[in-house]
Amino acid sequence: MANPIVADTEVDWLLPGSPIRPADVVRRIELICTRVPDLYAALLLVHATHQFVNPGHLAVVVKRMRPELQSMAEPDVAGLLNSISAGGRPGFESVLRHKSKAARPKTPLPWSSEN
């Protein structure tokens, strides 16, 4: 039987079952988005380090931090995050091309500023 992982480092928030503190998530995503200039790399890092956070919630925060996503609806940004795990860079670029050109009606999320 495998021994459980003991969380005793500064990266214990990455471990499964760690509590999700919204203020910490926002701070980490802001740090990632300001220090990683490439959009794909930034979203890949956000997605990889916050797998237990709902993509819709991540999309709200990422959209605020990345100016190139301002014209997209939050569900489209969530689609970009999902495309990273499903299709890697080619899938991401395909979704980005399609969603940035499409005029999609806004579907407000209750926690979003787009209401």
Image (spheres, rainbow, N blue to C red):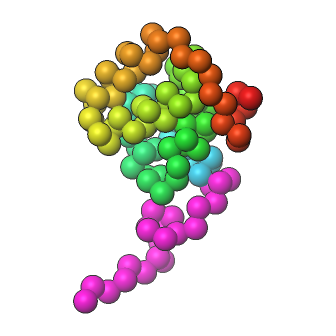
**Residue 7, how many percent across, how many down?**
47, 76
Picture residue at 34% right of the left edge, 37% below the top: 84
Above or below 81: residue 5: below
Above or below 14: residue 108: above
| One can see residue 5 in this view | yes
Picture residue at 58% right of the left edge, 44% below the top: 57
Residue 44 vs residue 31, the one in the foreground: 44
Magenta stretch encompasses residue 4? yes
**Residue 58, how many percent across, how many down?**
55, 43
In the rendered structure, the answer to whether residue 107 lies left or right of residue 110 reads left
Q: Give the range drawn in magenta.
A: 1-24
Above or below 5: residue 50: above
Picture residue at 59% right of the left edge, 61% below the top: 20
In the rendered structure, the answer to whether residue 8 lies left or right of residue 92 reads right
Picture residue at 47% right of the left edge, 52% below the top: 50
**Residue 37, how many percent across, how many down?**
45, 28
Q: In which quarter of the image is the N terminus?
A: bottom left
Residue 65 vs residue 80, the one in the foreground: 80
Magenta stretch encompasses residue 107? no
The quarter of the picture where residue 90 lies is top left
In the rendered structure, the answer to whether residue 47 lies left or right of residue 23 reads left
Above or below 114: residue 5: below
Residue 23 vs residue 16, the one in the foreground: 16
